[in-house]
Image (tube, rainbow, N blue to C red):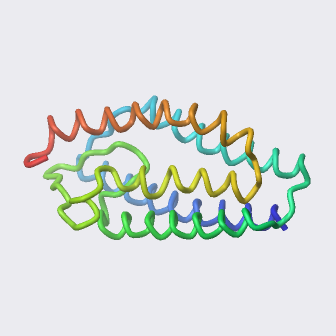
Amino acid sequence: MILYLFIFAFAIRLISLFISIRNEKRLKLEGATEYGKANSLLLTLSHVAFYGLCLYEGLHKDARIINVTYIGLILFAFSMAMLFLVIKQLGPIWTVKLIIAKGHKVNKSIIFKYIRHPNYFLNVIPELVAIAMICQAWTVLMIGLPIYLIPLTIRIIQEEKIMKAMVKDY
């Protein structure tokens, strides 16, 4: 059953990836610029590795559905709701990459007003914790999450620097 939950979670993530790819292609056709390509690749690989290692640990331990699985599912549902809220708020400029559109405007909706980088803090980090909980992958959570936070921190620093330099009113 853990495998089916994992596949479902991964499928939802793939939907967001397709949205990102569509937006990225259009943005680049309109003259947008991508920054931090190497770190974006590292983040992608880290995300896939985290998922894969959680699945491996869960299957290796023969994880069953227990109370923590349900908590993980609730956290995952929250993280996906936040992901799709951010996608809706940012609309055609949302991508998983660091791409700045020509005439990029600062989003001043309530979620962006009160939470700096809501995609990372309300989606990505809770999502990874949730996947580890669903798979009961405690080793991956304790070792993998701190490692994942390295390229994520680099991304946030890059994004802040680029936005301050390139976007008016940031």
Residue 51 or 38: which is nearer the viewer?
A: 51
> Which image quarter: residue 39?
top left
Residue 128 point in image, percent of width and height: 59, 51
Image point (73%, 44%), residue name: 138
Residue 23 in the figure: left or right of residue 45 = left
Image point (50%, 36%), residue name: 149
In the picture, which quadrant includes the N terminus?
A: bottom right
Residue 53 in the figure: left or right of residue 44 = right
Residue 14 point in image, percent of width and height: 59, 60
Residue 11 in the figure: left or right of residue 94 = right
Q: Farthest residue in the front direction?
A: 67
Residue 25 in the figure: left or right of residue 59 = left
Query: Relative to 69, does residue 44 appear above or below in the rendering?
Result: above
Residue 36 or 139: which is nearer the viewer?
A: 139
Tally of numbered tags? 0
Residue 50 or 37: which is nearer the viewer?
A: 50
Q: Farthest residue in the left direction?
A: 169
Residue 125 point in image, percent of width and height: 51, 50
Query: Relative to 138, does residue 165 appear above or below in the rendering?
Result: above
Residue 153 point in image, percent of width and height: 41, 34
Image point (47%, 57%), residue name: 123
Image point (31%, 66%), residue name: 91
